[in-house]
Image (cartoon, grey):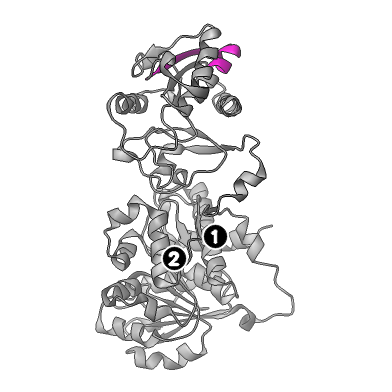
Amino acid sequence: MERAGRAAFNAIREHFSEQRKWLVVCGAGNNGGDGYVIARLAREAGIDCRLCALKSPDSLSGDAASAAQRWLDHGGNAELGPPRNLSDCDLIVDALLGTGLDRPSEGEYADAITSINASAARVAAVDIPSGLNSDTGRAMGGIAVEAELTVTFIGLKRGLFTADGPDHAGTVQFAGLDVPKAVYETVNDSGILIQENIVHFNLSARRKNSHKGDYGWLLGLGGDRGMSGALRLCGEAALRSGAGKVTLLTHPDHAAVLNVGRAELMVRGVAGGGEAAEALADADVLVLGTGLGRSDWSKSLLEACRGIAKPMVLDADALNWLAEAGDVDDFIKTGSAVLTPHPAEAGRLLGLSAAEVQQDRVSAAQALADKSGAVVVLKGCGTVVSEQGGRYAICPLGNPGMASAGTGDVLSGVIGAMLAQGLDAWAAATVGVVAHAAAGDRAACEIGERGLIASDLIERLPAVLNPR
């Protein structure tokens, strides 16, 4: 607890170097004990620090009681009850509730969280923002502290990086507290937090003596009437992500104009799935679903792909057709596949609502991976990648500007290009998700989040995939 409190204090003081009037709000457990350590260290450093306690120090036990006593011995006192006079401080340290929370905050705790969020002071959270579920990332009961900085200990909690987590945690800073490596080796079900360096680990430099056939032929199928743009975005993203060549099979009504302005795309109009056999036989990787639609033409293209033993990406209406048929596992069992659903599509495949999927995004992705036998990319804030057997990863990159039409089509093209270049389904999914998110972050830094469009990501993919 002393190490945790000192690590948090040092991080908070560095991040909020201009703030000199602190209020530390402590709960009843070890999280509160960390708060007492922080308050004592702040006072020792000459910071004007008050402490508010929702449980009297003399009723605490264990390490928390010892930490509270040291605070009192150094001349501190505890204001009991929810915090008051918040206008008197410029920084609030949230040490109310820790990682064990499994129900909504109530009573004085809910009142304290509401007051903290309503304050004009800046906010730091200890280990996890109070009210946030550390496993699911849900703000329990819709109420959780909104922090600018969260200093978390021993392990990165997945709830900080998905669902509501990023909106409440702010910047996450990790403190290992010198926990022995052997402790981590006892944890069997921990996930991976994937970052941009995963690109370098999986994509090696290209040999000078190579040709387009070495980097795969990707076949995109979709683009029903009125939805040609989705397939175009997918194909352009695949080219910009390194696929050797890309062919698009689409509705005859717009096939002649689909590659206007992007001559590198090969386009064929097909009246139905029966005309796709030759291309399906020759291509290395399939991407099915972007702009596919729900017509008889759409279904014939889907059925033409059934039983094709090739790596594939299934997105959008391909997933909706398979949810309706109830045979997603049968459809893809002969080849490695990546599914890229948003929460509503994942819910249809699992027989759940989108809201139920969002209640526990990691568990939903794992369930769909087990059901389908595919690698699942559950899109959204803190995209989750999971494969059969439970392995999962969370991507902390990306931004709200990417919540615009077509960005999912771009993602399908990126992942398809990774498959075309020889990555297995897990590597293709994780690298594709990171590259897509990092391209979105570059676009947001250059032009801003509001007004960002899918093609902005495509333009920045090469810079992400070819680090200097």
Q: Residue at x 65, y 46 (%)?
A: 182
Describe the element under mark 2 as helix, strand or loop. Answer: strand
Quadrant of the image occupied by residue 270 = bottom left
Q: Earlier in the sequence, mark 2 or mark 1?
A: 2
Rendered residue at 61%/58% (across/down): 198
The residue located at (56%, 76%) in the rendering is 420
Residue 221 visible to the viewer:
no
Where in the figure is residue 247, as x and y percent of width and height? Answer: 48, 82
Q: Please, what is the three-letter code of the amino acid marked with disc 1?
A: Ala
Amino acid type of the residue tagged 2 in the rendering: Val
Q: Which mark is residue 376?
A: 2
Which residue is more in the foreground, 384 or 1? 1
- Which of 250/264 is in front? 250
Q: Is residue 33 left or right of residue 184?
A: left
Residue 145 belongs to magenta span: no
> What quarter of the picture does the N terminus occupy?
top right
Q: Residue furthest right?
A: 208
In three-dimensional space, the C-alpha distance between marks 2 and 1, rounded to whole angstroms, equals: 17 Å
User: Magenta segment, which residues?
Assistant: 40-54
Task: Left or right? Give the position of 202 relative to 251.
Answer: right
Quickly name the residue at label 1.
Answer: 435
Front of the two marks 2 and 1: 2
Q: Position of residue 444 (x, y in %)?
A: 48, 49
Q: Secondary structure at mark 1?
A: helix
- In the rendered image, the vertical position of residue 47 relative to residue 178, given as above or below: above
Q: Position of residue 283 (x, y in %)?
A: 51, 85
